[in-house]
Image (tube, rainbow, N blue to C red):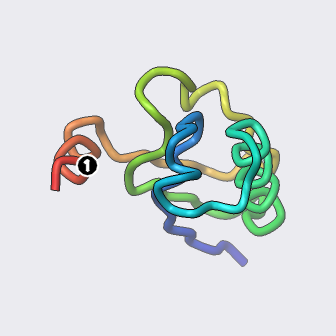
């Protein structure tokens, strides 16, 4: 069975988001690893994954460089939509 997953606000590579949001991590590397490990536990190879914004901070992490172990079909919203969301 194919599942559709919708997610947002990973903020990968964003060191200050740990403090801003009270995320329980000692470092940005620990946060990024935990987020991606949890994602890979849930999303299967036949699933469809939609990122709805705020995937990572600027160009510090390239979305194409993130290995999603499940190899799910993945879609990301455009930069323009992400920017509009971030400005509000």
Classify mark 1: helix, strand or loop: helix
Q: Is residue 4 left or right of residue 70?
A: left
Percent across and percent down for residue 71 are 74, 46
Question: Can you give x and y, in whole percent of width and height, for residue 5 in the image?
Answer: 56, 69
Q: Quadrant of residue 44?
A: bottom right
Quarter of the image containing the C terminus? bottom left
Measured as percent of width and height from the top left, residue 65 is found at 65, 25
User: How many numbered discs sit on the rendered protein?
Assistant: 1
- Seen in the image, is 64 located left or right of residue 7? right
> Residue sitting at 34 percent across and 46 percent down?
77
Q: Is residue 65 above or below residue 76?
A: above
Closer to the camera, 12 or 17? 17
Left or right placement of residue 54 versus residue 32 in this view: left
Quadrant where the N terminus sits is bottom right
Residue drawn at x 52%, y 22% as measured from the top left: 60
User: Is 31 or 35 nearer to us in this picture?
Assistant: 31
Q: Residues within 10 Å of mark 1 (few under 14, many from 20)?
A: few
Residue nearest the observer in this picture, 82 or 31: 31
Residue, far bottom: 1
- Residue 35: x and y in percent read 71, 54
Please report the residue visible at 50 percent of the width from the left and 38 percent of the height from the top. Answer: 56
Q: Residue at x 41, y 47 (%)?
A: 54
**48 vs 1, nearest the viewer:** 48
Q: To which residue does mark 1 refer?
A: 86
């Amino acid at each position: 069975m194919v599942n559709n997953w919708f997610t947002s606000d990973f903020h990968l590579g964003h060191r200050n988001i740990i403090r801003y949001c009270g995320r329980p991590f000692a470092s940005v590397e620990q946060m990024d690893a935990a987020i991606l490990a949890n994602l890979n536990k849930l999303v299967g190879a036949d699933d469809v994954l939609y990122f709805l914004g705020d995937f990572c901070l600027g160009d510090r992490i390239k979305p194409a460089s993130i290995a999603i172990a499940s190899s799910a079909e993945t879609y990301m919203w455009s930069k323009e939509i992400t920017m509009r969301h971030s400005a509000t």
